[in-house]
Structure formats: structure tokens, C-alpha cells
Image (spheres, rainbow, N blue to C red):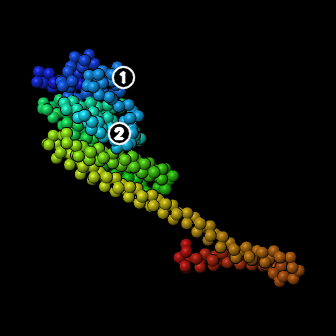
Amino acid sequence: MLYVHYTEDDQLRETRSADQLRRLKPEQVVWLDLLKADGQEQDLVEELFGVDLFTRQEAQEIESSSRYSELDGIISINTNFLVRKGERYSNEPVSFILGDTFLITQRTVELKTFDDAHRRISLSTLGADLNYRLLTEVFETRIDFDADFLEAIARDIADLSKELTAERKLQDDVLIRINHLQEVTMLIRVNIVDKQRIISSILKSQHFPDGEYAKIRVMIKDVGSLLEHTQFNFARLEYLQNTFLGLLDTDQSKVIKIFTVVTVVFMPPTLIASLYGMNFQYMPELSHKWGYPFALILMLLSSLGTLYYFKRKNWL
């Protein structure tokens, strides 16, 4: 699918028609957004603009030269945008090709960042640097969305903390949820670090208009604050994990303590029963009328005495 923003009669227009794109001159196109573009659409774009579009494998390369490059006045950028589907998060590759007058973007998923950018461009004023402004605005919007993701994770961590410390829920799913939040936070951190690398490379470029560098510096600071936020989330999750394990150890210690007390309480009665279970011929209590009740009372008193001793020592 094609989203084409172009200039005609000193006005900014939009089309999604490949036939209309064929009739345009490259200098008329301001922004060409490719969403799940098929082979014919990609061939048309490459022929019209004289560029090589990225394959998905190329967009996912991690080398610095593959993430950002400047060649013959063309800036090529490959990055990842975080996508949430229910409770699952994933990084989806997004590519940018920035020329002197045009911006080409490639993606394979719907992204609210680009939906907002398409709405914004309709309100933008024409200018020689509109394609550069669009690129910085996309990254500005993306950073805001990443901040929203982090805030959502922070709320989930706070809710989990209340369940763990206030309600003392020690089910297995709590530890699984902690692990899930750790994985998501790690994924967000990787995504933000990638943005930091890209924006730092843009800041070093000499191609951007002077008015955009102030925005880029602000974005660098925003990305730095997001990285600090991810570190804070990691620390909170580690604290929750330690709290969970500590409470679990406490509960297990209580169980072991109960078993230990029960074992010790029954040791004196067992000793008494063992003594009177011996097969000696001359045992005074064997012929005594109250021998059996005496043995039972002795075993009961020994157990109660042991419990009383533990209670005095505050072991119970």
C-alpha cells in the first residue's frame, strides 16, 4: 500500500494510487510511505527515485553501517519500532530513505506513529525542508509513544507490588509476571538504545537544516531520560523479585518450623512408649492397677511441657 504526499499547484496533496505516482516527478513527492508494499510497488519506487529499497533482512541488521548511512546525499536509516499486541510486545523494523526533497518510509505493520504523522502533514506548511521536518517529527512522536509504554509498564509494576506486599499473594503466576515485565522492559530498553544510536548519528550529519538540530538535541535528552526510567523499572522489578523470594522463604521456614516443633513435641511421648514397650519381666508399673493411665498422662504432660517451653522461648 502506498501513501503519497506530493505538491501540486503550490498545495500539498495526497494519493494512494500507484498510477498517480507514475505521473508525478520525483521532486514533487514530499513523503512516500510504503506499508506492506508488493513487488510492483517497490519496483515503481526504485525506478522513480533511483534508490534501492531495503529487504526485511537488511532492515534487521544490527551493524552500525546498516542502521545509519549517508551516501551520495541520501540518508538511509533502519530502526525498530515497538508494537504492542495485547500483552505481548515486539520490535518491528522500519526503514527511512531521506533525499534532498523526499522522504521514503518502509514498514510491514500498522503504526499509530505514522497515522499521527499523516494527519500532521496535512496541516504542515510547504517548504524546502518539509521532508527533514517530517523525519524528526516521526522520531519525536515515536519517543513519546516509547515513554507511554514505559509508563504502562510502571503502572503494571506498581499494581504487582500492591498484590505482593499488601495482599501477600505468593502464587507462581506472580513470579511469571515479574519475569514477563523484565523481558518487556529489556525489549523497550533495546528499542530506546537503538533510537539513541540513530538520533546521535543524525546529530552528527551535515545535511539537516539548522533549525532541526535544536529538536534533535532535545530528543537526545528525552532518550537519555527514558533510559534512566528503564533502569528504574529494572531496579523495582529486581526488588519485587527479591521480596517474593524472601516471603516465599519465610513461608517455607514457617512450615519447616511447624514440622520441627511437631517432631520434638512427640519425642518425649515416644520415649515413654518405648520404655514401657520393653519386654522385661520385672517392671513395677506393669502390675500396677493405674499403670496404663499413668503412662498416658505422663506422655501428655511431656508433650504439654515441651510446648510450654517453646512458647516461653517465643519459638511458636
Q: Nearer the viewer, residue 245 or 145?
A: 145
Q: Residue at x 48, y 50 (%)?
A: 176
For the view shown, which residue lies furthest in the left direction? 10
Q: Nearer the viewer, residue 290 or 60?
A: 60
In the image, residue 212 lies at what x, y percent?
Answer: 17, 42
- Picture layout, residue 105 above or below residue 263: above
Element type at mark 2: helix
- Picture layout, residue 228 above or below residue 303: above
Q: Is residue 110 visible?
A: no
Crowding at dot 2, Cα within 10 Å, few <14 / some 14-19 / many 20+, comes out as some
Quarter of the image that includes the N terminus: top left
The residue at which mark 1 appears reads as 38
Q: Report the Cα–Cα distance between label 1 and label 2.
A: 23 Å
Q: Residue at x 24, y 20 (%)?
A: 21
Q: Residue at x 26, y 16 (%)?
A: 19
- Picture layout, residue 244 above or below residue 65: below
Place residue 82 in its image quadrant: top left
State which mark lies toward you, 1 or 2: 2
The residue at which mark 2 appears reads as 66
